[in-house]
Image: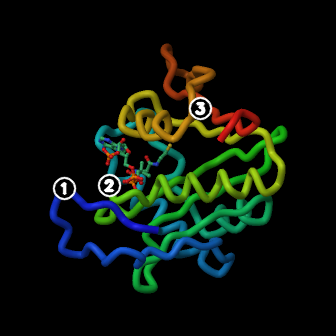
């Protein structure tokens, strides 16, 4: 994978080909949980209610890996991106997409989403789905630009207005 140029200069930017994307290993659950907590703590707006990902644990990651799987991106041996998934209704439910703050806007999330799509196609599945907070407009743009469309609005218990939306990418169409 060729990382994209960063508008921030990015002195830590690796040369093309330095990102390694591969399945997340169960022994990496503690590091993955720490990355998820750190990533969800740095968002452009603070979602209300706070994301459960802020409380992710190694056990939680292990459980998700046992019921599904996930991918990791590493740079020079350090985990900088993760994505978990579980099979759900002829598709994959994607969760915990997380990129370390200092490695953002270089295409890592897009690469993780592409890997999930490849896995779903390999399994002959029909769709990818995920949920994202309505206030995270950058996230919604990212998913839309990757072929997801918004399907259902949801409201957290105790809230008067919708707080999150399901997004879906159909894999039965061309592409
Ligand atoms: C969302 C997240 C995974 C994106 O990771 P990333 O590696 O930076 O994403 P990519 O570089 O692949 O894609 C970036 C694209 O996403 C969109 N985007 C994401 N965050 C954005 C922001 N804060 N402002 C504007 N655009 C944003 C843009 O379309 C951007 O494209 P561009 O760089 O060409 O403008 C990362 O910001 C993160 O970990 N956030 C905290 C956790 C989280 O919100 N996870 C998703 C839960 S649904």
The answer to whether residue 59 is left or right of residue 164 is right
Image point (61%, 66%), residue name:
71
Pointer 1 residue Cβ closer than 8 Å to ligand 1: yes
Give residue 66's position: percent from left, percent from top. 78, 65
Residue closest to the eye, 146 or 138: 146
Give residue 70's position: percent from left, percent from top. 65, 63
Give residue 145's position: percent from left, percent from top. 46, 37
Sequence order check, earlier mark of 2 and 3: 2
Marks 2 & 1, CB-CB < 8 Å contact = yes
Q: Which residue is mark 1?
A: 7
Which secondary structure lies at badge 1? loop
Q: Which residue is mark 3?
A: 167
On the rendered image, what quadrant is the C terminus found in?
top right
The answer to whether residue 90 is left or right of residue 84 is right
Residue closest to the eye, 53 or 168: 168
The answer to whether residue 10 is left or right of residue 173 is left
Image point (42%, 76%), residue name:
17
Marks 1 & 3, CB-CB < 8 Å contact = no
Which secondary structure lies at badge 3? strand
Q: In the displayed structure, would residue 161 be above or below residue 133?
A: above
Residue closest to the eye, 173 or 159: 173
Pointer 2 residue Cβ closer than 8 Å to ligand 1: yes
Image point (49%, 25%), residue name:
163
Give residue 99's position: percent from left, percent from top. 42, 60
Which secondary structure lies at badge 2? loop
Disc marking residue 105: 2
Q: Specify few, some or many for label 1: CA neighbours under 10 Å numbering under 14, 14-19, or 20 or more.
A: few
């Amino acid at each position: 994978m060729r990382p994209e140029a960063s508008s921030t200069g990015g002195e830590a930017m690796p040369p093309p080909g330095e990102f390694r994307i591969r399945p997340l290993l169960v022994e990496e659950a503690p590091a993955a949980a720490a990355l998820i907590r750190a990533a969800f703590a740095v968002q452009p707006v603070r979602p209300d209610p706070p994301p459960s990902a802020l409380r992710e644990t190694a056990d939680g990651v292990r459980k998700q890996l046992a019921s599904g799987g996930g991918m990791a991106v590493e740079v020079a041996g350090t985990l900088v991106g993760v994505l978990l998934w579980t099979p759900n209704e002829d598709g994959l439910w994607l969760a915990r997409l997380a990129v370390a703050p200092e490695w953002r806007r270089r295409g890592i999330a897009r690469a993780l989403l592409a890997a999930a799509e490849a896995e779903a196609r390999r399994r002959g599945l029909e769709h990818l789905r995920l949920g994202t907070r309505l206030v995270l407009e950058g996230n919604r743009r990212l998913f839309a630009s990757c072929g997801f469309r918004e399907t259902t609005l949801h409201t957290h218990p105790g809230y008067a207005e919708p707080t999150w939306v399901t997004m879906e990418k159909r894999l039965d169409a061309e592409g």
